[in-house]
Image (cartoon, grey):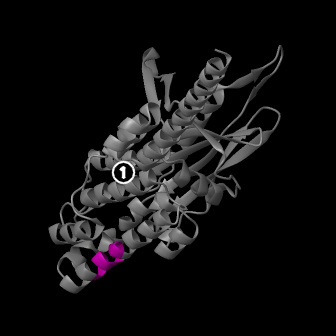
Amino acid sequence: MTVERRDVSDSFAYDDAFRTMEGECDDILIPFVNHVFGQHYTKDAIIKRKRNEHYTEGDESDVIKRVTDSFFDIIEGGVRQKYHFECESGRYDKTILLRFFQYDSLIAADEVKLGKYDLTVNFPRSGLILLRSGGTPPEYANITIKTPENSTSYKIKIIKISDYSIEEIFNKHLYLLIPFYIFNYEKDLSTIEKDESRIESLGKVYEKIVDRLNFVHQQGFLSALSYSVIINMTKRVINKLTRKHESVQRKVGISMGGKVLELPEITAYHLGIDKGIEQGIEQGIEQGIERGLAKGEAERKELSDEVARLKKELEELKKKA
């Protein structure tokens, strides 16, 4: 049996897709967290992204950098909760739980409650996204910590891409999973590549995905930035996974809208917010334009009121003269 070796850059490409959506798109992340952990955050919840690099000592005092895929706080109603996600493109193995415990321990140590004779650490709620599930992983993995007096445990929520249909993804607003939906076809890509009808069928699947994304964006449930990020990350993941299947890659690429962009939207979005209408219009980002227009309108109104006040004072002076 031939075993295909995967380039290490593959996992980086998929991790980057996840990090981009998590790091830039609140309206994608909040419903995903709500679904995974049974939360009820609203659009007013505040997300604070935290540093995902931590350093520990290895053998012979070597410093080891550990990088989490995703670490953030969500704050609403005066309550703050930590969250940690890892996006795994390899098969599940038992070493993943060891890494989770290492990461979660470092995250917990960032913020501690320190008394004179006691120390309290707050572990995050953690989730694992399996792009290639394989076997039958359970809904939760479990980490048990035994102390001299007692023991405690916490759960790692496991999210398998293979468990979600497109209907479920859209009905539950799990847009974060869309770029990785192609993994459901990975085992069949070689067969699909040789069958024009199956290539057409897969292309139609992605045409419908784009149509539905257009609809939720137009209805105001998905921002222009998030819409663009999802489309572009989906293209990048598909191009990486289907690089040895040119016909599939070409057809699905056409269905998704052609050439992969370099995501200027993210930079433009931030410029639009920071500099208002001028950069917002130049970059064509909806949020930047809207905020710039609002700011410009407020300034125009303030100036108009000031002019009206000065005219009134001038008229009064003329009467007195």
The residue that mark 1 highlights is 14
Query: In the rendering, at what x and y percent does residue 122 appear?
Result: 71, 34
Q: Quadrant of the N terminus?
A: bottom left
Instruction: Please indicate whether residue 195 sits to the left or right of residue 58 in the image.
Output: left
The correct choice, above or below, for 128 with respect to 35 in the image is: above
Q: Residue at x 23, y 86 (%)?
A: 197
Q: Residue at x 58, y 67 (%)?
A: 172
Identity, as a three-letter code, of the amino acid under mark 1: Tyr
Query: In the rendering, at what x and y percent does residue 32 appear?
Result: 57, 56
Instruction: Please indicate whether residue 171 sits to the left or right of residue 188 in the image.
Output: right
Q: Which element type, helix, strand or loop, lies under badge 1?
A: helix
Q: Residue at x 51, y 50 (%)?
A: 94
Looking at the picture, tell me which residue is in the foreground, 165 or 205: 205
Q: Quadrant of the C terminus?
A: top right
Q: Residue at x 70, y 47 (%)?
A: 154
The answer to whether residue 132 is seen in the rendering is: no
Provide the residue span drawn in magenta. Answer: 201-207
Instruction: Please indicate whether residue 1 sits to the left or right of residue 37 in the image.
Output: left
The answer to whether residue 100 is seen in the rendering is: yes
Looking at the picture, tell me which residue is in the foreground, 215 or 208: 215
The correct choice, above or below, for 63 with respect to 172 in the image is: above
Residue lying furthest bottom in this view? 197
Query: In the rendering, at what x and y percent does residue 272 appear?
Result: 42, 38
Looking at the picture, tell me which residue is in the foreground, 70 or 316: 316
